[in-house]
Structure formats: C-alpha cells, structure tokens
Image (spheres, coloured by chain):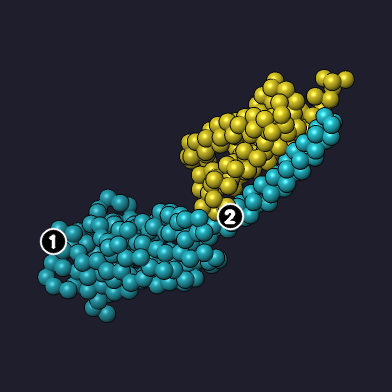
Amino acid sequence: MKNGQKLVRLLLLAPIAGIAAGASAALQAGEFLKFSPVPSNVAYALVLLVGLSVGLLVRGVQEGLLTSVLITIIGTITLFLAIYLPNVEIVATAPELILRSVWWGALSIFFLTIIGIVVGRILSGE
Amino acid sequence: MRSETRSWRQIAGIGLLAAIFVLSLVLLFLTERSYGAFRDTLKNIQFEIRLTSWEEAAPQQARLRWQATVTIPDLKVPVQLELLDWHLRSTDRSVHLGFYTTGEVQIALTRTTSIPLEALLEGPNFEKLQRLRAESQTLLFDGMARVMFRLPQGEVRKKIPATSTFTLPTEEDDGL
C-alpha cells in the first residue's frame, strides 16, 4: 500500500514539477533571456521553489533523490522542446548553440531541485 | 499533531507547486511570443540597394552612389542599424573592386529607412571597373549589416547580408 502511494505520488509530482522546472529554466536559456519578462535570477529561484515544493511533499531521502532525477529528465525534455521548436532552422546549422543551453539548464535543474528538496525536508522537520 | 503538520505541509507543497507550474508556463508563453515576434521581424527585414549615380570624378577616379532602402514591415521594438562594410565585385565574384565602409554610424530604423552610400574607386580598382563596364558586366554589391534590437533585458545584435546587383551605364549609353 505504501509503495503504491509512493509510486502514485512520484508519477503525479515528477511530470508537473519537471515541466515547471524546465519552463523556468528555459527563461534564462541563451537568447531567450533577452526576451523573458523576468531576469535570470528569478528563473533560477523558480526552479529552486519547484524543489522546495517537492521537498514538502515527498517522504524520505531516497524518494527525494528519485523525484529530483525524474524532474531533471522531464525538465530537460521540456527545456529542449522550448528552445528547439522556435529555432528549428538555427538548430539545423548550429546545434551546439542549443546543446550548450540544454546542458547548462539540465545541471541547474538537477542541483537547484536537490537543494530545494533538502530545504523542503528541513522545513518539514526531517 | 503530527498529521496536522503533514496536511499543512502537503497543502503548502501542492499550492506552491501549482502556482509555480502556472506561473512558469505563463512566463514561458510570453517569452516565446516575444521571441517569435523578434524572429519574424528579423526574417522580414529587406534590403534594396539601388545605384543612384555614377561619375568619373577625376582621371583614374570614379564615384558611385547608392540608395539602400531598409524595410521592416512589422516593427515592434526599437532597432538600430550599422552598415559594417561592403565589397564591390563582378557578379561571378572573379573580380574584386575593393571594400568600403560608412564608419561606425548607427541609424535608427523605421518601417522604411533610406541610407545614402558612396564609394570612390581609384587606381587599379578604377581600371578593373572600366574593363567590367566596357564588357557590360553586372556588378555585385556585397555588404553586411548589423541590426541591434533594444529589448527590456538587453540588446540583441544580428548580422544580416545586404546584397544587390547593378549595371553601370556603358560609354554608348552615356553618349545617348
């Protein structure tokens, strides 16, 4: 029963948090930053808050780590699509431009989510 | 007491996650829309370069004047332009007649902006020009412009090509 609940929680949390983290990370990615209504530190703060909110919902270190990995994977896919779709022609000629942004975004999502989850667990009294 | 804490935490966690989910998607939508408008503007910038006059200013010296017309059909953000430099060549690119520049002059663009350009060809370039003129060869204006978009979070600079072909009137045309 407990494992079933954990799985449902994971399957619900990871996609929502992943999409939110990926969309937030896209706000500071490469040229997008110039067009974003918010500066880059707000984009990073949003990713951190995603981690914090997840940290308030998960239970245990193992579940927190697993959720952050899933958030990073889904967030990276979201980030890739957010940058790739409006730049299809550019990516065809210079793929390194988008890959650099995606790589940096994935690292940011992973580490900021982990930090957020740890803070969330501390606030929960774990 | 423990279950009360847990439910408070869950409500806070779900509320925060839902708020960030909506906020991040709204911000991403606004960013993508603004970026899409910029890319459309960039794609629709048109250069039309027309030779307006040609004269032999002195022996072994020719002065060519063009009118560059920059058209931006859908101008939404302030744009400035810098015509970096341009080369004159024969259309098949086998003969090079030198490169010229307007200097670091920045021009604020409107929907349609006309920029006068001038080149003074001397010495060997003048001789090559005369030869191409006698052969009635078409010439190529091969330039590069830098457009600078002023955006809320900074400036975006893009280089775009500005090319055009033109033919100089031959001596027979001059005589008519």
Residue B24 seen in this snapshot: yes
Residue at image point 39% right, 57% down? B146
Chain of the residue that carries numbered disc 1 in the rendered image: B
B36 to A68, vertically: above or below: below
SS state under label 2: loop
Amino acid carrying mark 1 in the image:
Gly
Quadrant of the rendered image containing residue B101: bottom left
- Residue B123: assigned label: 1
| Few, some or many residues within 10 Å of mark 2 (<14, 14–19, 20+) | some
The Cα–Cα distance between marks 2 and 1, rounded to whole angstroms, is 55 Å
Give the cyan chain's letter: B
Residue at image point 45% right, 56% down? B155
Number of marks in the rendered image:
2
Q: Which residue is mark 2?
A: A37
| Quadrant assignment for the C terminus of chain B | bottom left
B52 left or right of B175?
right
A95 left or right of B27?
left
- Residue B66: assigned label: none
